[in-house]
């Protein structure tokens, strides 16, 4: 899908990130230069500790780089203050986390409503849940749903605001194959039907077959960038 | 309702036990505040309205006798608005149902209309008619206590003549909101009454035609009260003036002012304790919630919720708990205020006491609770919402433990694993352990403070009537009489011992300071009236010089050996000097004493006496009292023992009620703190405890680890509570000190034991509730959950 003329959504230039944990410094990113394009489905591949979550968090405005530049549609995110970062997340970004991070005291519909309530042009919560095939589980609490269902609620919650980018951190990490495939199907259909730029972190190489591009990270650096000529559908994956 | 609000209510439902415990603590604090404040406002307003409507005077003076022409001269003094002159006389009463003699005070009413100052409020019947002999209006307290009705007759000795008086009406006066016989500590409504009689009748009965012996004044706005008093004294000096006083020395006014002062203290100290404890509890409970919801907070922030929105969400949660507490406190406080106002209204006589639930008091109560609560949680919330979402998404790092002090000292060899875990948990967060201890300690302190009143008053009474004033009755003669009159008393059957005294009204002056009081001349060998120091040591009267209450010495700024000017307020009104030769650090009044011979010498008079202290054989009490009633020279009899007994009966009843309140309040705090700490510990350590269960610990063993910590903290808290409690009592005894009373700082061992026992029971009860939580620990779910 991405063509030469495609618009750049994100651009990172020499991004580094150092965490100071007590007396040790952890270099999570050591100079990352990369670009993400409008409407593309990118898989970020790498072992645990390779820096992929850190990169995603920085793109999503959850964290700031120690050095380097992150440009979101011509805006330098390093200049954002706390409020602007919040505003950016609120208006442009959808997050899906490995452990779903649903509010346990709210039903599926209410978890989605939590976001639609503060978004500028949201879908109806029911509509978003319909998109991830959960139209029949609207009033269930997280504790009454399977892991796959909870993750799909999380996806519905992420897409309900019609975000510009959808950032997913190991969305299938806690799931078995069948439920993982369902979640990936949901992500793929959102990307296809809404044209949302989607970045998915995984350490599962098989998932990279469904991406437009695969960026592999290792030890805080980009090891390789691979473009898939043919993509597989989520339900064709097997691991 | 927005999803965040739904979350809020479901979170609250989840923590309902804790929320209720905290709301109850807040509620109790607000209730005491509202109860005391509304009572305070109701009483103040009732008094203000009463004073205003019935024209309570500003300045009071008694005198021996002055012609009515003097009234105009008084009225012409600068600063005076209104003058009312009257005849006020003491009478002894012979009440049909009472063996003991009773006394009364008759105040004259103008022949026509009502007094310009100190008007009477007619409750029942009518005012006396000027032309009818023996008609009186009686004060309500006396009428109620004796069960009289208008139309009833009583016999009284007026000026040595027995007369039958008819009660034609029942009334009240702002001068006698509480009726205490001068020289007595407690009101005794059964044996002391106030009566009003028309002037013409009083003139006839007391040979006071065209004269008066009592005057009250109201002042113009901005008048100099001290100057008026000075000028009035000067003017009345020729007429046997006994010294003018302002409202501050007016007995009834003073009593109520002291009561209002106590209510004010009550509305500040206990609520402050409750609010501090509530703030601490909210802090602990909310910090725990924030830790549990760390990832939810991160998620909310990741979706674009601002810090302030997330913070507001948690503050709202706290707000709902506080609001519940405040509403509960409003209701309970209103009830308390109503019953307290009712109680006071039966004790103090106002024409009308309206319970005033002022909006401002309720608002202040709410503001105090919200402020305290928000102070308790603000820092925690700010910290929790400030964590960057990426960081909050990661689980919190495991807590760092260090070997506890005991282990560093090498004492741990004697401890097995469970106490070690308890010790490390305590030393890891000493601040939390300390605050928990402090919280429980405060509960313990409340119980101690609650019983302090009983201990202090019981001691005070034992001191006053067991050590100091050991006589059964005091008789007062109309005039100073020769000592031989005592022999007529000696012949009364049942009187075991008689000790005479001479009493002289004086104004003591030292430099610019002065005080009106009396000097009592006492014999050297006394058994019935002794002077005792606050450390229970007997104080002997030196051969010369004056011994005074140290409170009086403080007022006059006198030291031992100083010379004090004695302005005698009767007879020839001589002015003499006397050396301060002793002080008595006693608990009530501002009295002064001398050897009787020394007083006679000072007065340059022969051996005359003003009255006597009597010890009466209980077996012949009735006969002795009857004889006293008929003794012609006796102007009045005060029955200390009987008054104390009736006071103590009343007091015991009120005490029981107060004690119930205190136990309830302290239990709310103790259970609130213990339960809350246990809940939080259970939640924080459920994973650890479940692991212990999985590796084979029994429920009892696991409970011991968790509850052992609380048992330890409770055990620590009790001595802490003793310290706080006794400190508070010491403070309260100082804060409530007035010129009339000094409250001794006394706490009985049983008070400490009671407080410790209530705390222990509360701790065990809350442990049992939490124990159920441990028993129901879902091992698998807990171990699978991520934290």
Image: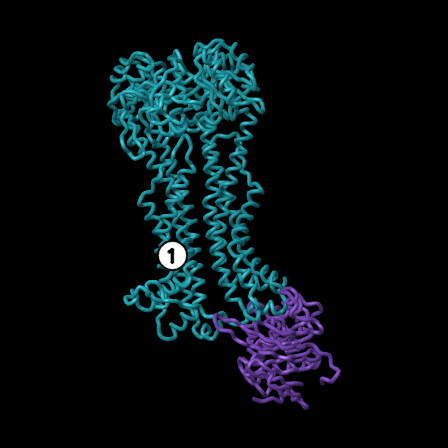
Chain colours: A purple, B cyan
Indicate left or right for B620 with A44 as reference. Answer: left
What quarter of the picture does the N terminus of chain B occupy? bottom right
Query: Which quarter of the figure has residue B239?
Result: top left
Residue at 41%, 41% (x, y): give it. B731
Front residue of B649 and B117: B117
Where B643 sits versus A210, above or below?
Answer: above
Where A38 sits versus B521, above or below?
Answer: below
| Element at label 1 | helix
Where B146 sits versus B714, above or below?
Answer: above
**Picture coordinates of residue B640 (x, y %)?**
33, 27
Front residue of A159 and B542: B542
Query: Which quarter of the figure has residue B568?
Result: top left
Residue A57 visible within the image = yes
**Picture coordinates of residue B101 (x, y %)?**
35, 22
**Picture coordinates of residue B355 (x, y %)?**
53, 38
How many numbered marks, from 0 up? 1
- Residue at numbered disc 1: B763
Indicate left or right for B616 with B361 as reference. Answer: left
**Picture coordinates of residue B686 (x, y %)?**
43, 68
Query: Which quarter of the figure has residue B682?
Result: bottom left
- Please tell me how crowded label 1 is: few (under 14), some (14-19), or many (20+) other residues with Cα within 10 Å: many
Where A2 sits versus B111, above or below?
Answer: below
Outermost residue on the bottom side: it is: A230
Which chain is home to disc 1?
A: B
Front residue of B512 and A227: B512
Residue B108 visible within the image = no
């Amino acid at each position: 899908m991405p063509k030469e003329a495609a618009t750049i959504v994100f651009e990172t230039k020499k991004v580094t990130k150092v965490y100071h944990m007590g007396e040790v410094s952890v270099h999570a990113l050591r100079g990352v230069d990369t670009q993400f394009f409008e409407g593309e489905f990118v898989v970020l591949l790498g072992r645990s500790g390779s820096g992929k979550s850190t990169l995603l968090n920085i793109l999503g405005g959850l964290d700031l780089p120690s050095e380097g530049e992150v440009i979101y549609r011509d805006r330098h995110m390093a200049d954002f203050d706390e409020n602007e970062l919040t505003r950016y997340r609120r208006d442009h970004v959808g997050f899906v986390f490995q452990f779903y991070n649903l509010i346990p005291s709210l039903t599926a519909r209410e978890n989605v409503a939590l976001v639609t309530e503060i978004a500028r042009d949201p879908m109806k919560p029911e509509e978003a849940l319909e998109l991830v095939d959960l139209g029949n589980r609207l009033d269930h609490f997280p504790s009454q749903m399977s892991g796959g269902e909870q993750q799909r609620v999380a996806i519905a919650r992420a897409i309900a605001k019609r975000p510009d980018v959808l950032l997913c951190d190991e969305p299938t990490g806690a799931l078995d194959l069948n439920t993982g495939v369902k979640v990936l199907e949901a992500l793929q259909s959102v990307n296809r039907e809404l044209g949302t730029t989607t970045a998915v972190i995984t350490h599962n190489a098989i998932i990279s077959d469904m991406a437009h591009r695969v960026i592999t990270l290792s030890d805080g650096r980009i090891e390789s960038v691979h473009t898939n000529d043919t993509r597989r559908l989520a339900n064709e994956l097997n691991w | 309702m927005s999803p965040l609000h739904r979350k809020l209510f479901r979170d609250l439902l989840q923590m309902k036990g804790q929320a209720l415990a905290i709301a109850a603590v807040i509620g109790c604090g607000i209730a005491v505040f509202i109860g005391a404040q509304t009572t305070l406002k109701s009483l103040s307003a009732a008094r203000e309205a009463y004073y205003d409507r019935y024209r309570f005077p500003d300045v009071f003076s008694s005198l021996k006798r002055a012609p009515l022409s003097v009234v105009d001269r008084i009225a012409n003094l600068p600063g005076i608005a209104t003058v009312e002159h009257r005849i006020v006389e003491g009478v002894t009463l012979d009440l049909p149902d009472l063996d003991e003699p009773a006394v009364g005070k008759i105040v004259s009413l103008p022949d026509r209309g009502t007094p310009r100052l100190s008007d009477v409020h007619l409750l029942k019947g009518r005012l006396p008619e000027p032309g009818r002999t023996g008609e009186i209006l009686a004060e309500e307290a006396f009428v109620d206590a004796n069960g009289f009705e208008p139309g009833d007759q009583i016999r009284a000795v007026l000026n040595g003549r027995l007369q039958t008086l008819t009660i034609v009406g029942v009334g009240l006066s702002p001068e006698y909101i509480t009726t205490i016989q001068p020289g007595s500590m407690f009101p005794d409504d059964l044996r002391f009454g106030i009566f009003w009689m028309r002037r013409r009748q009083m003139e006839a009965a007391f040979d006071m035609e065209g004269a008066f012996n009592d005057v009250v004044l109201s002042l113009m706005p901005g008048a100099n009260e001290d100057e008026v008093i000075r000028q009035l004294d000067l003017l009345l000096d020729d007429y046997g003036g006994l010294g003018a006083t302002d409202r501050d020395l007016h007995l009834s006014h003073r009593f109520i002012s002291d009561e209002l002062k106590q209510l004010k203290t009550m509305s500040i100290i206990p609520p402050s304790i409750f609010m501090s404890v509530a703030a601490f509890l909210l802090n602990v409970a909310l910090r725990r919630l924030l830790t549990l919801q760390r990832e939810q907070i991160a998620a909310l922030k990741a979706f674009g919720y601002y810090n302030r929105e997330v913070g507001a969400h948690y503050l709202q949660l706290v707000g709902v708990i506080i609001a519940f507490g405040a509403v509960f406190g409003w209701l309970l406080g209103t009830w308390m205020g109503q019953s307290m106002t009712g109680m006071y209204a039966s004790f103090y006589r106002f024409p009308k006491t309206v319970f005033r639930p002022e909006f401002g008091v309720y608002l202040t109560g709410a503001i105090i609770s919200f402020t305290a609560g928000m102070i308790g949680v603000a820092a925690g919330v700010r910290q929790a919402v400030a964590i960057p979402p990426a960081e909050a998404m990661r689980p919190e790092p495991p807590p760092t433990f260090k070997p506890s002090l005991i282990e560093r000292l090498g004492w741990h060899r004697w401890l097995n694993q469970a106490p070690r875990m308890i010790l490390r948990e305590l030393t890891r967060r000493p601040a939390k352990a300390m605050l928990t201890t402090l919280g429980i300690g405060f509960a313990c302190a409340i119980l101690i403070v609650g019983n302090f009143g009983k201990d202090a008053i019981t001691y005070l009474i034992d001191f006053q009537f067991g050590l100091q004033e050991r006589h059964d009755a005091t008789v007062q003669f109309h005039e100073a009489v020769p000592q031989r009159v005592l022999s007529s008393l000696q012949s009364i059957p049942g009187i075991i011992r008689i000790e005479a005294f001479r009493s002289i009204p004086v104004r003591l002056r030292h430099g610019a300071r002065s005080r009106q009081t009396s000097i009592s001349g006492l014999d050297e060998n006394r058994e019935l009236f002794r002077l005792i120091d606050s450390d229970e040591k007997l104080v002997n009267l030196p051969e010369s010089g004056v011994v005074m209450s140290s409170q009086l010495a403080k007022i006059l700024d006198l030291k031992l050996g100083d010379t004090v000017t004695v302005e005698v307020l009767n007879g020839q009104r001589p002015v003499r000097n006397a050396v301060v030769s002793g002080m008595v650090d006693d608990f009530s009044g501002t009295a002064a004493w001398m050897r009787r011979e020394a007083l006679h010498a000072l007065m340059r008079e022969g051996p005359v006496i003003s009255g006597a202290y009597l010890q009466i054989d209980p077996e012949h009490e009735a006969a002795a009292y009857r004889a006293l009633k008929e003794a012609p020279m006796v102007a009045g009899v005060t029955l200390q023992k009987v008054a104390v007994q009736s006071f103590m009966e009343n007091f015991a009843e009120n005490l029981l009620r107060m004690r119930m309140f205190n136990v309830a309040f302290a239990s709310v705090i103790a259970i609130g703190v213990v339960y809350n700490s246990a809940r939080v510990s259970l939640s924080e350590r459920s994973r650890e405890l479940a692991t212990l269960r999985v590796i084979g610990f029994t429920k009892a063993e696991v409970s011991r680890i968790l509850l052992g910590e609380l048992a330890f903290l409770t055990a620590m808290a009790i001595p802490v509570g003793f310290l706080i409690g006794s400190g508070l009592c010491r403070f309260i005894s100082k804060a409530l000190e007035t010129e009339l009373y000094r409250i001794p700082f006394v706490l009985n061992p049983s008070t400490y034991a009671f407080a410790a026992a209530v705390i222990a029971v509360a701790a065990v009860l809350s442990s049992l509730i939490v124990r159920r939580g441990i028993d129901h620990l879902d091992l698998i779910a807990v171990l699978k959950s991520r934290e």
